[in-house]
Amino acid sequence: MRTIMIALAAAVVLALPAAAQEKPISLKRAPGVEKVEANCAGCHSLDYIQMNSPYPNAALWDAEVTKMIRAFGAPINEADAKEIAEYLKKNYGS
Amino acid sequence: MSSLDRRRFLGATVAAGATLGHALPAWAQAAGLDLPKALPEGVRASAVLESLPGKRPLIKLSYRPPNYETPLEYFRTAITPNDAFFVRYHLSVIPEVNASTWKMSIGGEGANGQAEINLADLRAMSAVEVVAVNQCSGNRRGLFEPHVPGVEWGYGAMGCARWKGVRLKDVLDKVGLKKEAIEIVFDGADSAPIEKTPDFIKSIPVWRAMDESTIIAYEMNGAPLPHFHGAPARLVVPGWTGTYWMKHVTSIKAVAKPESGFWMNPAYRLPVGRFPMVARFVSQETETNTPITEMMVNSLITSHADGARVGSGSSVGGIAWDGGYGIRTVDISTDGGKSWQAATLGEDLGRYAFRTFSFPVRGQGNVTVMARASNAIGQTQTTSLIHNPAGYHHNVIHSVSLVLT
């Protein structure tokens, strides 16, 4: 994962000025938020999380995290995945 | 990929994470947006009006990949301006393709030969035009109850443009199809930041590929296809939902077995028998589900916002569309659906286009105006939501509450 984040950082340096319209998404500051930012923001902006709030229940947030790993190949280890799912359930769930 | 300009639209915050404050907080910006109350609170709090390069301010749902919907006010005419047209991507690496060096490959095991075609080749071929609606399969997903996760679109994940290009069948004729060919598979220049993410690849059945209306477009409303709409050339499948309209096409392959990638299955599926689909995609069907195909008949009142004060006798209007059979009538009710009266239809730009409608509403006080479109094969809009796991095909009758004065 470290390699991927480094690769992404390199890509950012080459990004077009046209991409500068992306503003930071401030997720709720709570335990696990750093894991979310480090693992999720590489592939998509974090507004995806806010957008679905507050409907997903615990099972749905678990399913979303699993989908990101299994279907989309997100390189997230088991411990981080658990922490991310817990954060989402507590802060953006129902 | 070597022909592409590899500059990327990756967002500046990818690795930087949250940085210090920017202008107004999101909730303050969203406050100016008149979003449907049925949308999730999270959308209503985080959506903002923002412009992508070359675009007017649209309703930003996600920055990366960019998902921006068109505000209601742009749906008062049958043609949606290019710079107000919604933007939808699945994957966030979106190269700005250099039109002068771009080319697409044509071939595959189901083709007799192989060819490469560039933009000059396309422009030298016999040109056709079609006015057609491009609507995201998940348009109005945010209005689903129970909630369905995904991009929480309101009403604006759609638009209608005049597309100019060449018939796909003329492109396929350059290589010739074998009789075993069952699907035509499309890939575009966009991709994901990590290799394990399935590339966005879509197929359509051969019968649909050979249909006269299916084109490879290089112009949109008289202008070269804009970047966010698939420059320099995209697939246009009039009547079918936007998922098939591959942008920045780089490869077209005829295949003898069904395309099996993630974006064909399990993505973009509907339970068998749930919707009155006429157009079928048999090679992709299973016992329980089917790929989404044509759009359902639908309409939207766009002349007034919910809660507007309107003089008696004023025209209330909007647009209607369907999967390409053509709108026959739009009926209006002001008594909760007990009685209906036909609206006047506007200019007919073809059976794949938005059809405008208008109706004078009379009376005093509070009135709820409902619009219900029907098409040439007798299909009409649903009165209650037809739920499905991915949140597609929302075509519940739309209504607005007005105060007549």
Image: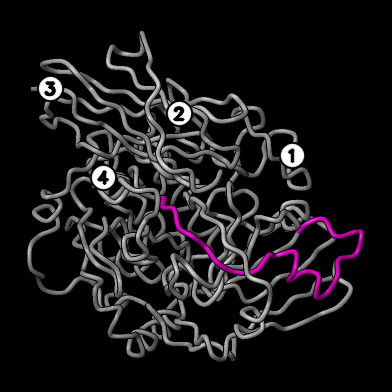
Q: Identify the residue position indicated by label 1 in the image.
A: B286
Gap between marks 2 and 1, in whole Å?
Answer: 31 Å
Q: Distance between the residues labelled 3 and 4?
A: 45 Å
Report the residue at 44% width, 65% height from top. Answer: B221
Magenta extent: B158-183
Q: Position of residue A22 (x, y in %)?
A: 25, 71
Residue depicted at x 50% and y 59%: A69
Front tag of 3 and 1:
3
Spatial separation of the CA atoms under disc 2 and disc 3: 24 Å
Q: Are marks 2 and 1 on the same chain?
A: yes
At label 3, which amino acid type do we have? Leu
Q: Is B174 inside the magenta-drawn segment? A: yes
Mark closer to the chain start, 2 or 1: 1
Residue at 65% from the left image edge and 27% from the top image edge: B273
Q: Nearer the viewer, mark 3 or mark 4?
A: 3
The secondary element bearing badge 4 is classed as helix
Report the amino acid beneath label 1. Thr
CA–CA distance in space, label 4 to label 1: 38 Å
- Distance from disc 3 to disc 1, alpha carbons, whole Å, reads 51 Å
Mark 2: secondary structure = strand
The residue shown at (61%, 79%) is: B123
Q: Earlier in the sequence, mark 2 or mark 3?
A: 2
Q: Can marks 3 and 4 be said to lie on one chain?
A: no
Residue B104 falls inside the magenta stretch? no
Q: Numbered disc 4: what chain?
A: A
Q: Mark 3 points at which residue?
A: B404
Colour theme? one colour
